Image (spheres, rainbow, N blue to C red):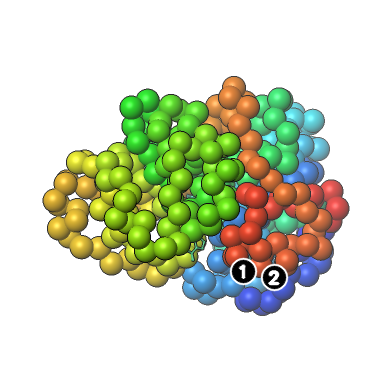
Amino acid sequence: METKGYAVLKASEDLVPFVFQRRDLRPNDVALDIHYAGICHSDIHQAREEWGPALFPMVPGHEIAGIVTQVGPGVTKFKVGDRIGVGVFIDSCRNCKACKAGLQQYCSEGMTGTYNGYERDGKTIAQGGYSNKFVVDQDYAVKIPDNLDLSGVAPLLCAGITLYSPLKNWGAGKGKKVGVMGLGGLGHMGVKFAAALGAEVTVFSHSANKEGDAKAMGAHHFIVTKDENWKATAPKDFDLILNTISAEINIEDYLQLLTLDGTLVVIGLPGKPYSVNVPTLLGQRRSLAGSMIGGIPQTQEMLDFCGEHNILSDVEVIEPSYINEAYERTVKSDVKYRFVIDAKKF
Ligand code: NAP
Ligand code: ZN
Ligand code: ZN
């Protein structure tokens, strides 16, 4: 089916209008009209080859919210008119331990990414959500609760689940002190979820002007990291710190803020290795961990949680022609708090 979108034709070039074909429906596929697609910092990292060589032409976008327009004969999970979401992957091996546990993002063969990779046939380039139509296997899509506005839902498909998953995995809740590093697309979702789960939430930000927003989202404390003095006065009793910063930082400064048995989870992926002082870890039995998005069952759980608690991403809805400027503004941390493309305008 003919699909209109925006693509990067060569690394680091501006995105340009791009017309391409999506596959005809297989028995278990659904087709959807994309209504909104979020701009994740991972899109920018990949379009600019900050994570190594990428595949072009690239239609980025893995925060997709839309409405089903067609279903294959084997589809039981969705019907025409359903509001559904697609995130960072569109397939996986389905047989390994991780896949069987619903942790498709950790598939031992590697998840099949929504873009910047080949589909499982090994030859079709997967193209992402900066486009007006999408085709996906029903097992890799999730249902969006009726009460949630689709524009604020799109970012939940990556930013939302990526913060919800570690908060649940490391037991954030009442009586726990949680730190969120970076109040961007991911970070602002972390604040909303941690607060909704009952934790005491502190934001570490290099943007002093975000304090009011952070508190409105549920943060209890806000620490500005712009000037070096912040380390001397920061509390050192965090149970869990989530690093969502997209740039190089000194992770050691934050590891030192963990309490006994505390964990710092790395989520931001600037692309270079970190250096860690071993005594900082063993002195308080601290852990340094990583976490990547979330599997399909947990993504559905997260959306249902958002439906119950009325949680949405704070978005700036843009036209496709604004994508390049949105990239520049995202890199400058100048977005409140996620750009979302109105996909009906492609
Ligand atoms: P984003 O919206 O650009 O937010 C990143 C935030 O990091 C900014 O808002 C800013 O927060 C802070 N920051 C940026 N530059 C900084 C600097 N030079 N020094 C200190 N802080 C800085 O990005 P995002 O979409 O949330 O993504 C964040 C990172 O997570 C990216 O690297 C992305 O690739 C990665 N990611 C990982 C996963 C996963 O599964 N692990 C999933 C999605 C994305 P303040 O203004 O508050 O300081
Ligand atoms: Zn993402
Ligand atoms: Zn697998």
State the SS at label 1.
helix
Q: Position of residue 324 (x, y in %)?
A: 72, 67
In this rendering, position of residue 140 left or right of residue 241: right
Q: CA distance from mark 1 to mark 2?
A: 7 Å
Q: Which residue is mark 1?
A: 47
Mark drawn on residue 8? 2
Going 59% across and 22% down the picture, which residue do you hit? 308
Q: Position of residue 68 (x, y in %)?
A: 76, 36
Q: Amino acid at mark 1?
A: Ala
Eyeballing the image, is 301 above or below 178? above
- Direction right: furthest residue: 345
Instruction: Respond yes or no on whether mark 2 lies under 8 Å from ligand 2.
Output: no
Q: Position of residue 205 (x, y in %)?
A: 48, 54
Do the numbered discs 1 and 2 sit on residues whose CB atoms are within 8 Å?
A: yes
Q: Amino acid at mark 2?
A: Val
Q: Position of residue 339 (x, y in %)?
A: 69, 53
Q: Quadrant of residue 70?
A: top right
- Direction top: furthest residue: 308
Query: For mark 2, does the 10 Å Cα neighbourhood hold few (<14), some (14 to 19), or many (20 or more) residues?
Result: many
Q: Report how many numbered discs are placed on residues in the image.
A: 2
